[in-house]
Structure formats: structure tokens, C-alpha cells
Image (cartoon, grey):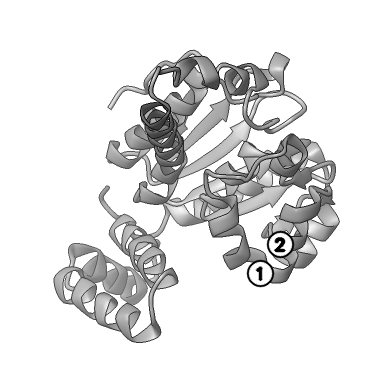
Amino acid sequence: MPTPEFRTISITLVDQIAEVRLNRPDKSNAMNEAMWQEIRQAFEWVDAAPEARVAILSGEGKNFCAGIDLAMLASIQQQIAHPDGARSRETLRRLILDLQDCLSCIERCRKPVLAAIQGTCVGGALDLVTCCDMRYAAPDAIFSIKEIDLGMVADVGTLQRLPRLIGDGIARELAYTGRNVDANEAEKIGLINFKSGTISALTAEVRNVAKTIACKSPLAIRGIKEVMNYSRDRSVADGLNYVAGWNAAMLLSSDLGEAIAAQREKRSPLFGD
């Protein structure tokens, strides 16, 4: 599949690794209306493209993302204007649900998504990276739940996903205070998988992780993400039952045969997309 072209995002596909890069560096990659929609379109493409086995989400310039574009936030009143207050609030609810979906598409994407984060990652950007499978940061990365400083409740995923990553108490502290978390603390509390030694090394180190994933069975990788996402929100018993059904359908694949043959022949396996 040809890589799509967007106004606020760039996509490249090399060696089965798709890189989705936020591309408004002059605005610190703040998420305007077009970017929200293009994030969803980009990861729908990653999901559908057989040749894309794993994705890296990154940001152009010195900052990963400064969150929602304040101009977009200021325009919401006009977007939802209606003589009937109830209908106006219904429109706002639908808008919020759509923005949630623009980010949830990363979880729905069958391929693993690795976030490479440098500089600012605040507000809506934190919502964005909590949807990813893993997060990696440069030494200058700064994270915060900024919505409290705008007098609002974060509403596109951080309050639901972050406690499952770092624990309820720390997540509440960050949500209530809006304080900054640097890369060292982010690594300590489990928000990121690891902190890169330098900013320049971040992309290479994350790409090495992505290369390892891209060499594995794509069918099994997609299954792992599906099962882990399902199990996260349910009981252990439900998760075990689900994976039993999954493997009853998917276990006896050509990838299993190839993996066994490769081990027997002491070579690297070659999997189809």
C-alpha cells in the first residue's frame, strides 16, 4: 500500500517499520483539528498495510507535542453553538467522543506502536502516548497532565489509562497538581520503558526495539496485542478464556511451522506479512 500524505503528519515505511511523525514543529506539534483526524487516519493505514509490522510515533523538532492547540480549544464554543443548550451539550459530547476515538485508534491498531518522546509531552500529548504499547524518552522529556491548569478535566484517555501504567496514587497526584515529571522520574514510576542516553540516540534505540519486533511472527505479534488489550480490562479468568479461543483459531499457523523449522535448521525464520 502506498504511504498516505497528510498536512500535519508524515509517514515513512522502511524495513517493515512505519514511522508516524507529528509535523508541526513551529507549533511544538500542538494538535490542531487536522492533526487529530490525521492521527486516526495514519494508524488506520498502519493497521491495514500488510507490510507495516510495527510503528514508531515521534515528533518533528525539539518537542514531541505540546498537547491540544489552544486555538482549537478556544473555537469549541463556536463549533457547538445552538439555541438549545441541551443540543449544544450533546454536540460537545459527540466532539469529545470523536477526539477520544482519534487516539483510541492507536490501541485498535493491530500492530505495536512505540512512542519516541523528546522535549515537551503534556496535556493531550500524554493522552496520546498512553495509548501506545511502549514509551521511550530522551533525557530532556517532560510529562504533565496540564488540563488542571486550564480548569478542566482531562477527557481523552489519560485519567483512564495512566493509572494502569503508573498506579492510582501517582496518577491522581499528577492529575490534581499538574506538576512536571522529568525523564528520570518517568522511568522510575514506569511511565516509560527506558530513558535514552542522549536525544540523538533516542530514535536509533527505539528503532532497534522495533526491528526486533518486526522480525517476529506478525500473526503472533498481532495476537499478543489483541489478547493483552482484552485482558487488561477484564478478570484473569476472562483473559485466559479469551486466549484459549484465540489460539484455538490461530495457533496452528504457517508461522509456527516456520519457527520450528528455523530452530531445527539453526537459521532465522522468515515470516510472511
- Label at residue 255: none
- Identified at 76% across, 54% down, the residue is 176
Q: Are marks 1 and 2 in contact (CB under 8 Å)?
A: yes
Give 226 or 19, whichever is nearer the viewer.
Answer: 226
Whole-Å distance between the Cαs marked 1 and 2?
Answer: 6 Å
Q: How many marks?
A: 2
Q: Is residue 48 left or right of residue 149?
A: left
Which residue extends farthest front?
84
Secondary structure beneath dot 1 equals helix
Kind of residue sitting beneath label 2: Arg
**Callout 2: helix, strand or loop?**
helix
Q: Which residue is mark 2?
A: 172
Task: Provide residue 9's location: percent of width, then percent of height.
Answer: 51, 22
Front in this rendered view, residue 85 or 158 = 85
In the image, is 174 to the left or to the right of 229? right
Q: Which residue is mark 1?
A: 168
**Residue 110 against residue 101 in the figure, above or below:** below
